[in-house]
Amino acid sequence: MITASAALISTGHAFANTNLVQDVITLTSPQFAGRKTNTEGAKLAADFIAERFVALGYSVNEQGFTYQSGFFSEAVGRNIVAIKNSPCEKCKKIIFTAHYDHLGQQGSRLYPGANDNASGVAALLYLADHFAQSPQRYQLVFVATDAEENGLHGSDYLVSTLNTDKIKLNINLDMLVVNPRKPRIYAFLDKQSLAHYKDDIKALSDEQLTFMATSSSARLNRLFDLNVDWRKASDHYSFAKAKIPYIYFGIGHDKHHHQTTDTTEHINFILFEAAMKKIALFIEKLAS
């Protein structure tokens, strides 16, 4: 019997990174039921992510937290934090984040969240694998956050535990499925980071992918005909509030966002991997 991942790889994605494919498929599978925070599906997803980090040689810690859910109740969330022992333990940290929660299941309607944000978690694991054996100038910390959809609660809790003086940068990964008709990756940066990294990010562009760096919500909104405060759009906002520099990588607008159609069928894994190779190249330069 051919598994779902094998079938996908053999039909148009033969050269895509197997782990990228498999991680997205696993996170969007029916057993995870859309990964809604405080559900069995989210618990299974967190367990899977922790196991993947351990297999890559990382030490894994879990951050349990509670947050207000409605007027009279609390919900429980769970961040997964992966770090590798290194001679750079006293160095400043670069913290990578990607939220693994999504909308879950509403009646018979399942919201798989392939782009939002199984793609970001697969990207997080890809980068953890890429840098697993590479000594760096900074200590790299990889965090799969929970309860982003409900109000950035996981990243807020994470930042509350940090000594901000020891953090170099946050790199947030959210919605990285490249649109083949407009193959672009957008890097939204705080103004403090923009001068340092804008040219390096733009230099990642090639004939296959375009990388654009900006700190202007207005500029992105003109491109997508939206009205979004991109500074507050994902987990990087928790770092922004603490005055920690950040870079948010994503594709911007996706017509399948928060729809039941956000499935693996709409992922071009070849372009997804190409984007991740470029982002890894940027991080190598930044962290070396």
Image (cartoon, rainbow, N blue to C red):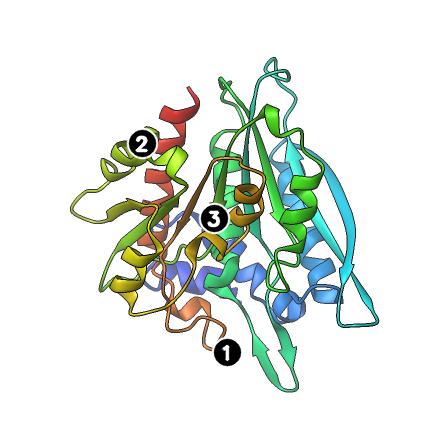
Q: Say which residue label 2 marks.
A: 195
Q: Which mark is residue 260?
A: 1
Vertical comparison of 257 with 53: above or below:
below
Going 24% across and 39% down the picture, which residue do you hit?
202
x, y percent for residue 60: 71, 37
Q: Quadrant of the rendered structure where residue 148 is?
A: bottom right
Tag 3 or tag 2, which sits nearer the N-term? Answer: 3
Whether residue 157 can be seen here:
yes
Going 78% across and 49% down the picture, which residue do you hit?
64
x, y percent for residue 143: 61, 42
Instruction: Kindly state the secondary structure of the residue where label 3 is placed.
Output: strand
Going 28% across and 32% down the picture, which residue do you hit?
200
Q: Say which residue label 3 marks.
A: 173
Which residue occupies the foreground of this view, 255 or 236?
A: 236
x, y percent for residue 281: 35, 32
In front: mark 2 or mark 1?
Answer: 2
Whether residue 280 can be seen here:
no
Instruction: Kindly state the secondary structure of the residue where label 1 is placed.
Output: loop
In front: mark 1 or mark 3?
Answer: 3
Q: Quadrant of the rendered structure where residue 95 is?
A: top right
243 left or right, relative to 162: left
